[in-house]
Image (cartoon, rainbow, N blue to C red):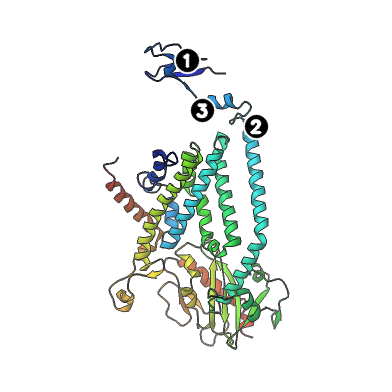
Amino acid sequence: MSKLFSEENRAAFSKPLNLDNPVVIQVLGICSALAVTSQLEPAIVMGLSVTVITAFSNVIISLLRKTIPNRIRIIVQLVVVAALVTIVSEFLKAYVYDVSVQLSVYVGLIITNCILMGRLEAFAMQNSPWPSLLDGIGNGLGYAWVLIVVGFVRELFGFGTLLGFQIIPQSWYVENGGWYMNNGMMVMPAMSLVIVGCVIWAHRSLNKEEK
Amino acid sequence: MATKKFKCELCGYIHEGDKAPASCPKCAAPADAFTEIVEAGAEAPAKKKGLDTSSNTYTIIYASVMVILVAFLLAFVSSVLKPTQDANVENDTKGQILTSLNIDIKADGYNVAQEFEKNVKDMLWNGSELVPFEGKFLSSYASAIQEGELHVFVAEVEGETKYILPVTGRGLWGSLWGYVALNADKKTVFGTYFYHSSETAGLGARLGERWFQEQFNGKPLFEGENTGAIALKVVKAGSAVADTEVNGITGATLTGNGVDAMVREGLAAYLSFINN
C-alpha cells in the first residue's frame, strides 16, 4: 500500500493540480477552454470527460509502451485515444442516450485535446500503469478546475445565472427598472482567454516563492 | 554486440567491458561499487532477440495489426449496439415531435413511444391531400424534404387538431432540425422544437432550450392577409418588435440566422399545404 502512494506517485497526481497545471503553467488545452466555458455546466462535463479519457488512455499507452515502435508512436497514441472515445460514445448512445446527446459536441474536442497527447507522450510512454493512471486523473482534474473557474465567471457575469439558476435577482436588471446589465463581453469566446490570463496571473503571483 | 558499461558509484568513472574491473582506476573503489549501466537502446536487442522495435518490418506489422484490431473492435461494437442506438434515436425523434406540442416528455411515467402511437399520425402531403405514410418511421427528415416527400404529423391535443411540420437547415457549424406545430387554422404556431448537431455549447446550442423555442408559441406565420410568403422570422437578440419576429440568442447571431432560414424555407416548402 505504501508503495502505491509513494511520494513520487502522490506528486504525479498532485503536481498537475497546482504547480504543474496543464492549463495555467503548460498552457495546453486552451482551445477547449475557449469553446465550452461560456456556461458552467458544459465546463464541468468537459472537465470530467477529459479526466476519464486521460486516465484510461494513459493506462493503455503505459501498458503498451514497450512494444510501441518509436517512429509511429504519435499515431499509435492517437489511434488509442480516438478508438477509446469512439467506443465510449457508442456505449453512451446505446444505454444513456440523453447523456450522449449532451456530450456529442465534446467528443471531437476530447480527441484533439492537447493535454491528452501531451500526457501520453511525456508521461505514459515512460512510466508504469499505476503512476500513469494517477497522472491522468491529476491532469484531468487540473484542467477541470481551470475550466470551472472560467465557466463560473463567464456564466455569472454573462448570463446572471449559475448552472442555469438565476443568481442575480431579476429586479436588478435595467429592463425591470434596476441598474444591472449582463456583460455581453463575457459571452464572447475571446473573453475566456482574458479570464484564463487572469487566472495565470493570479496563480503565478501566488506561487512566486516556490519557483 | 556492444560491450557492457559499468559505472563507479563513488566517482562516476565509466568502465567498458564484459564485467566490472577489480578496482576503480580513478578512486580505487572495489568491484562491488560498480553498477551496470543499462541503456535503453542496448537493452531491447539484448533482452528480446528478433524484436527490434525500431525496424521497418516491426513498425509496419505493428501498424497493420493495430489498425486491423481497432477496426474490428469498432465495427464489432458498432454492429452490436446499432439496434439499441436506432431504437433510441427513433424514440428521441418521437419525443422531439411530442415536445413541439408543448408536452413535457420528461414528466414521470410519460411513455413517449405509446403516446406517440396513440396521438400522432404520420401523413404525407401529396400536393392536394393528406395520405397516410406507410413506410418505416424516419428519424431524420432532411433527405425526405429534399426529395419532395412532405411529411405532416397530425396530432390531437385536447380535442383540437395540430399539424406538425418537420424543418431542416444549417447552423453555424452543422445541421439544424426542428418541428413546427401549427394550430388547426394553419396560420399560427402552436409550438416548436429545435435541435442541432454541433452548435457552440453555451451559445448557439441554446437553441435547443425550451425558453427559446417557446418564444414561437402563438406567433402568426404571415403578415396580415399576405399568405404568399412566410413572415415569421428570427431577429437579433433583443430587437424583436413586430408580431412575427422572434428574439435570437445572445452571442449566437449566425445560429439565429440558421434557425431563421430553416423555419422560413422549411415552412415555405409546405405553403400549398398551409394555404389549403
Residue type marked 2: Thr
Q: Secondary structure at mark 3?
A: helix
For image coordinates 59% across by 62% down, the residue present is A95
Q: CA distance from mark 2 to mark 1?
A: 36 Å
Do the residues marked 2 and 1 share a common chain?
A: yes
Categorize mark 3 by other alpha carbons within 10 Å: few (<14), some (14-19), many (20+).
few
* Position of A201 relative to B196 (above/below): above
Q: Which residue is mark 2?
A: B57
Is residue B88 found left or right of B255 in the rendered image? right
Camera-side residue of A146 and B123: A146
Q: Position of residue A28 (x, y in %)?
A: 42, 47
Q: Which mark is residue B20?
A: 1
Query: Which badge, 1 or 3, comes first in the chain's sequence?
Result: 1
Residue B245 visible? The answer is yes
> Mark 2 packing: few (<14 Cα in 10 Å), some, or many (20+)?
few
> In which quadrant is the N terminus of chain B drawn?
top right
Q: Secondary structure at mark 2?
A: helix
Q: Nearer the observer, disc 1 or disc 3? A: 1
Give residue B204's position: percent from left, percent from top. 47, 65
Left or right of A137, for residue B196 = right
Report the quarter where the C terminus of chain B lies: bottom right
Q: Is residue A146 above or below residue B9?
A: below
